[in-house]
Amino acid sequence: STWEVLMMTVNNIGIPITMDGGKSHKNPFVTDENKPLIGINKTKNYIIFLFENVIKVMTISSSKLQQEIKVASARLLSKTTERIYLVTQSSIAYLEPAPYDKQIQQYLKNLRMQEALEILEQNIQYLDSAEKQIKF
């Protein structure tokens, strides 16, 4: 697999490029924030952007916005081997994704079929055969 980097433009558009200068097959990550980017981190399936008062979570596979989280006085987004931490002026918290089955159910409830399918595809390899049936 080729290493990729995310080059951020002045307009907060993240452009994936390969380390050898080639074009990435991934879509750009476009945010509508006019504020400076404070931090960025990657998980297995998501890229997390920290702006002054908001966290934006986008899927790596489709570059779609999945969640916005309002935060006050954010200072830092830091990743360890196990967690991503958010540091504000008065606290430290860690970010943890909701279980994939709850995410899928929420997307289906809101008729967002494509997003539900993406979450399932991202996680199906980690399921054993008994879990590959989702109950609604």
Image (cartoon, helix red, strand yellow):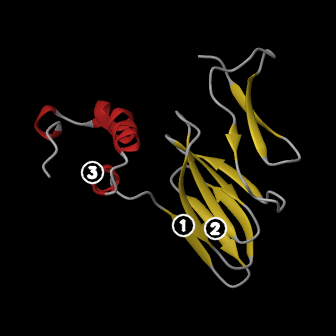
Does residue 20 appear to the left or right of 125 in the view shown?
A: right
Q: What residue type is labelled 1?
A: Tyr
Residue of label 3: 101
Secondary structure, mark 2, is strand
Q: Which of 104 and 3 is in front in this view?
A: 104
Q: Label 2: few (<14), some or many (≥20) within 10 Å? A: many
Q: What residue lies at 54% left-to-right and 67% top-to-bottom?
A: 94
Does residue 30 appear to the left or right of 116 in the view shown?
A: right
Q: What residue lies at 64% left-to-right and 30% top-to-bottom?
A: 27
Picture quadrant where residue 46 is located? top right
> Image quadrant for the N terminus?
top right
Give the CA distance from mark 1 to mark 3.
21 Å
1 and 3 marks in contact (CB < 8 Å): no
Q: What residue lies at 82% left-to-right and 60% top-to-bottom?
A: 34
**Image coordinates for residue 106, horizontal then vertical, percent:** 32, 57
Q: Is residue 4 above or below residue 117?
A: above
Q: Nearer the viewer, residue 136 or 8?
A: 136
2 and 1 marks in contact (CB < 8 Å): yes
User: Which mark lies nearer to you, 3 or 2?
Assistant: 3
**Image coordinates for residue 71, horizontal then vertical, percent:** 64, 75
**Image coordinates for residue 82, horizontal then vertical, percent:** 50, 53
Does residue 128 appear to the left or right of 101 in the view shown?
A: left
**Which badge, 3 or 2, is on the more N-terminal residue?**
2
> Which numbered tag is attached to residue 94?
1
Q: In this view, does 65 lie above or below 1?
A: below
Q: Is residue 23 above or below residue 100?
A: above
> Which numbered tag is attached to residue 22?
none
Q: Which amino acid does label 3 sit on?
A: Asp
**Which badge, 1 or 3, is on the more N-terminal residue?**
1
The residue furthest front is 111
